[in-house]
Amino acid sequence: MPLVTSKQMMVDAQNGKYAVAAFNIENMEMVQTVLETAAELQAPVMIQTTPGTVKYAGVAMLAAMVQTAAKTCPVPVALHLDHGESYELAVQALHSGYTSIMIDGSKLPFKENIALSKRVVDMAHAVGIPVEAELGKVGGKEDSLEVSDKSAAFTDPGEAKEFVLQTGIDSLAVAIGTAHGFYKGEPKLDFDRLAKIRDVVEILLVLHGASGVPDDMVRKAVALGISKVNFATELRAALTRGVREALVDQSIIDPKKFMASGKKAVKEIVKQKIIICGCDHKANSYR
Ligand code: 13P
């Protein structure tokens, strides 16, 4: 089916007390694998692209690829700009056919983050596309996006309430202790803070940095009101591991062969994450 926006699938997730799994992709093989697995598990799904991936392939190429793959996919698929860095990039992504936008002004002072996020909301809502923004700073490193442990900052519930009111965003990425990339030790999530944020805002909440977060913690975050969970690093690592394993055989020179091994490794991760988020067998409830 054609791409859908992220709004309805996330509202359905919020009402059904599960979360949509959102997967960052790097290439055609990852798109194919995520969609094939979502179809097998009857899960609505989000494909998303980081600024690094956008620089690498361009929004037009990425959108064309995902639109084409979604057309023959029997479950709802949304294409999301992850950590959109500027108003201009958000416009480009919309023109190319993205159906969900994140504007990440989390590095800016509070008022400037509000102003940038609102500007993107006004523009995207005019064409019916929902917007995610971030308040607080999710730590860790993903491509060019890096937030040191020192400058990572948790989302303040009071500020979250004001931010949501003033921007009109559809979903909020919360910083509650997760980080992009792999963790050095066991992540510590501030569930009390998440519960407080959930109490003061009614909009959809998003958990970033979920690679390496133990399954029971992801489940607990979903039970406390998270409606979308982002996974990138574990997929990248799986693809690379699968390709490496295949390339041990020096006679393999056909990318189709070593990519098949990478896809198999990615599939296992996608399957696990869909089940942890509880979005398997939810595609039919999509209206
Ligand atoms: P991970 O790198 O932990 O998978 O986080 C992905 C993410 O939050 C993308 O925005």
Image (cartoon, rainbow, N blue to C red):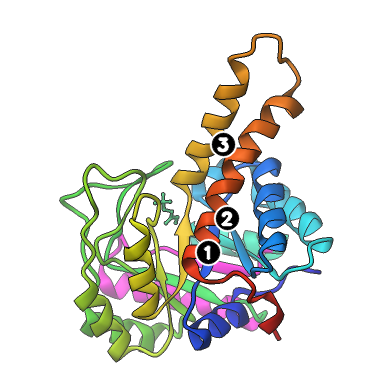
Residue 206 is marked as: none
Q: Amino acid at mark 2?
A: Lys
**What is the crowding at mark 2: few (fewer than 14 residues within 10 Å), some, or many (at least 20)?**
some
Residue 275 is marked as: 1
C-alpha separation, residue under disc 3 versus residue under disc 1: 20 Å
Q: Which residues are magenta?
A: 98-126
Q: Tell me if I can see residue 85 in this picture.
A: no
Quarter holding the C terminus?
Answer: bottom right
Question: Which one is nearer the viewer's eye here, 89 or 145?
Answer: 145
Q: Splitting the image into 4 quarters, where does residue 29 fall?
A: top right
Which element is circle 2 on? helix
**What is the crowding at mark 1: few (fewer than 14 residues within 10 Å), some, or many (at least 20)?**
some
| Residue behind label 1 places its C-beta within 8 angstroms of ligand 1 | no
| Residue at the spot of label 2 | 271
Q: Residue at point 44% right, 45% down?
A: 233
Q: Position of residue 255 (x, y in %)?
A: 72, 25
